[in-house]
Amino acid sequence: MRFTEHELTAALTGVAKSVHANGKAARKRRLDPDAAWEELTRYQRFQLLDGLGSQVLPVLVALPDVEVAAGTRPSYTADQVRRVVEDQVGDDLGRVRRAVLVKARTLLVQTALAHVPPRLDPDGLLHHPEGLDS
């Protein structure tokens, strides 16, 4: 799938916020994902984004191409995502460890896809709807 840089950034940031907000410290304090994210230092954010990026971004890039109408997000079934994840996870892990890794990474990618912003209409960006572009 060809995602824009903005879409990949939004997806990865959304996953990072979700993962951090579901951590023990943020859950205990009942912080929402944005508030928990704001409490992190820039370096802590980088570390989280770096670790998740190596797991999520290769899968997002390997997803099959789909047509995305303006105003909608790309959508994939859980089975499509799982198959791409399975192709990228090595066979050098034990059966149980591999199954856990595939399931966790599939959930991370599905969370990332939920945070991809709706696709913009490129024609709508060039031509203002009220005809002010003339």
Image (cartoon, helix red, strand yellow):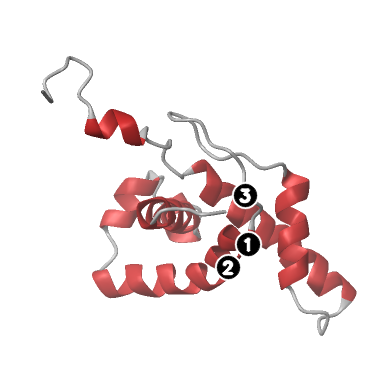
Q: Point out the frontmost of discs 2 and 1.
A: 1
Q: Residue at x 46, y 45 (%)?
A: 116
Identified by mark 2, the residue type is: Pro
As drawn, the residue found furthest toward the right would be 95
Residue for badge 3: 65
Looking at the rendered structure, which numbered label has been put on residue 62?
A: 1
Q: Considering only order in the chain, which callout, 2 or 3, is on the residue closer to the N terminus?
A: 2
As drawn, the residue found furthest toward the front would be 134
Identified by mark 1, the residue type is: Ala
SS class of the residue under badge 2? helix
- Residue 1 appears left or right of 70: right
The spot of residue 100 in percent (x, y) is: 77, 65
Residue for badge 2: 58
2 and 1 marks in contact (CB < 8 Å) = yes
Q: Residue at x 54, y 46 (%)?
A: 113
The spot of residue 107 in percent (x, y) is: 65, 53
Choose between 123 and 54: the one closer to the eye. 123
Name which quarter of the figure residue 101 lies in: bottom right
Q: Point out the frontmost of discs 3 and 2.
A: 3
- Residue 54 appears left or right of 91: left
